[in-house]
Image: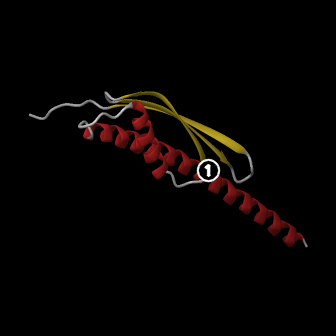
Amino acid sequence: MKSVIKYSILMICFSVSILLVMDINSISQRKSEMEDAAEISMRNSLKAVGIHKMYAVDESGMEAELLREFASNINSDTDYTLRIMDISRDGLLDVELTADFVHMNGVRDQRRLRKTMIIEAYDLP
């Protein structure tokens, strides 16, 4: 009887430690996904404006391109809120990204990221 209690306590401790490791890994994956998706989508939308100088792309077109790029880079079930702080055709893009997600224990959490990207155009000799 003593060994049954001892091993059941060990099993509970092992299960809790596995859940903790999985939760920490989940947080780290969500953070890296958020940073990577924001950077790639910002870079690609600014690059698209630079490529399409033949016709005018206004700020709403840039916003649509940014949202399309961001949505294509997200793979998780996290709820994202993308706020565009400043946008300019001259190569400036400033966004704030908020991620809402639920931990394995049911607790809701929120992470924020603010990223600014400036692209300078120059001519090669």
- SS category of the residue bearing label 1: helix
On the image, the x and y values in percent for residue 62 come to 40, 36
Q: Is residue 73 visible?
A: no
Q: Is residue 51 above or below residue 5?
A: above
Decide if residue 69 is on the left or right side of residue 57.
Answer: right
Residue 72, compared with residue 11, is above or below; it is above
Relative placement, left or right, of 2 versus 66 is: right
Residue 43 horizontal side relative to residue 71, left or right: left
Q: Residue furthest left?
A: 125
Amino acid type assigned to the residue bearing label 1 in the image: Ile
Foreground of the two, 107 or 43: 43
Check the image and name the residue furthest to the front: 55
4 or 113: nearer the eye? 113
Please state which of residues 96 and 55 is positioned toward the viewer in this rendering.
Answer: 55
Mark 1 Cα-neighbour bin, 10 Å: few <14, some 14–19, many ≥20: few
Q: Quadrant of residue 2?
A: bottom right
Q: Residue furthest right?
A: 1
Picture quadrant where residue 90 is located: top left
Query: Within the image, what quadrant is residue 86 found in?
Result: top left
Note whether residue 72 is visible. yes
Residue highlighted by disc 1 = 24
Residue at horizontal 48%, vertical 32%?
95
Number of marks: 1
Q: Is residue 83 left or right of residue 63?
A: right
40 shown above or below 76: above
The residue under the point 53% across, 45% down is 31
Instruction: Say which quadrant the N terminus sits in.
Output: bottom right
Q: Position of residue 116 (x, y in %)?
A: 42, 30
Quadrant in which the C terminus is drawn? top left
